Amino acid sequence: MRIAFFVWEYYPRLVGGLGTYAIEITRKFVELGYEVVVFTLNPGDLPTHEHWNGIMIHRPMIVDTCDVFPIVVTEDLRRWGTNIKFFCDIFSYSHLSASKFVNELIRKERESYDVVAVHDWLSAPAGLMIVKEIGDKIPVAFHLHSTEEQRSGGTGSEVVRHFERAMAEKAGRIVTVSYAMRDHLISLGYPVETIRVCWNGCSPEKYDPTKVDSKKLETIKASYKLEFDEKVILFIGRLTWIKGIQNLIQAMPTILAEFPKTKLVILGKGEEYQDLVQLAQRLNIADKVIFRSEWVSEEERILHYAMADVCVFPSLSEPFGIVSLEAMSMERPVVVGARGLSGFKEQVVPSGPDQCGVHINGEDSADIAWGVKEVLRDTMRARQWGENGRKRVLEYFTWDKAARNTLAIYEELIKL
């Protein structure tokens, strides 16, 4: 099978979980003997095409259309303000990638492909253009990792929602990341007969607590000035409202009342950074909350998991959430938001002999505090939860399983 893979973030330019997914799943496709050609955004300083790990990457050089779009687009896009640059770059990437794929690779070079995989609204314009140009000659799978309704809490951009709906209607299969997301899509009126669920994965070979360099771990702890007997609560992710970080910080005074020798380490970047710093200051716990607002290497991220006593991801809404798998693979107990739309619920067992963490309401700081204290109260039990978590990752959530399940969906699509 030869797969054309359209995703706006890819090596070496990563922004969030979508980029991690794209790199890991395509590498696994190649490892399993499949051919992958990736089309992705060029920020302006990368080669327009290159081979990487057996994968051909196309990055057409985009042009700035910021002065054009406000003239012709709807009032919805005008409200994006300075963020219109992001939309314009996405549209330019989609347009140029679709043109290169259809006109150069298929029509001129006579290359053949078995399936086109389009990821999220960010590549939906490319998918729609491809469907328009080549019709049903190559089947298209639309991967929905989230929706505008989910990301924005029910509001958001009407234009983005239209892209998502239009691409879903044109695709032969809609692939989503959890059963919670499937139910969400059905509730929005997406065609149920075309929806397939495929969980994301993790690399337990890399996220392995037995492979952690103890000297590097001590260096990380020293950089945060952690005392030997201090407990560490870890959050990793984008600093945005839907991740529930504000509520986690508000939970800290209650946690500290019972466990005063505890610090919260927040690793990530986002628009709420300054507000979160100010919140910690207002609560008089600035010395107990450590912010690391920068991108770090995967090796360093693994060291952060290794130094944590508990990992907390109190998302208000989360289609899947790879970070919890990474923490579980590192044998760390997890506390996860499990109200509403939550892929975390499908990963984390909250009770019984296979328990690996705690479900909480990410909107309730008291509930977050309760969940964290449940972990910190019993070290031996927390260690067992961590071991259970790694076992669960190995059984259900490897990239090998994710890739094979995705390929089975593509095979089903090809046979239609």
Image (tube, rainbow, N blue to C red):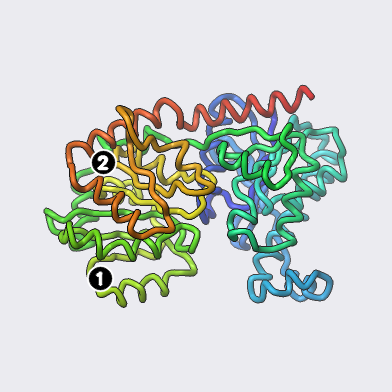
- The kind of secondary structure element at disc 1 is loop
At 68% from the left and 41% from the top, the residue drawn is 186
Q: Residue at x 69, y 74 (%)?
A: 79
Q: Quadrant of the N terminus?
A: top right
Of the two numbered discs 2 and 1 on the same chain, state the one appearing first in sequence: 2
Residue 68's place in the image compared with 167, above or below, is below
**How crowded is the residue under tag 2: few (<14 C-alpha within 10 Å), some, or many (20+)?**
some
Per the image, label 2 sits on a secondary structure element best described as loop
Q: Quadrant of residue 191?
A: top right
Which percent across, then down, holds residue 136?
85, 34
10 Å crowding of disc 1: few (<14), some (14-19), many (20+)? some
Q: As drawn, is 124 to the left or to the right of 35?
A: right
Comparing 72 with 31, the one in front is 72
Q: Which residue is mark 2?
A: 212
> Which numbered circle lies on residue 388?
none
Identity, as a three-letter code, of the amino acid under mark 2: Val
Image quadrant holding the C terminus, namely top right
Give the amino acid at mark 1.
Ile
Left/right of residue 211 with respect to residue 133 in the rendered view: left
Residue ID for mark 1: 285
* Horizontal side, residue 276 vs residue 104: left or right: left
Q: Is 283 above or below relative to 342?
A: below
Q: Position of residue 175 (x, y in %)?
A: 65, 37
* In front of the other: 409 or 370: 370
Q: Residue 149, relative to residue 378: is it above or below?
A: below
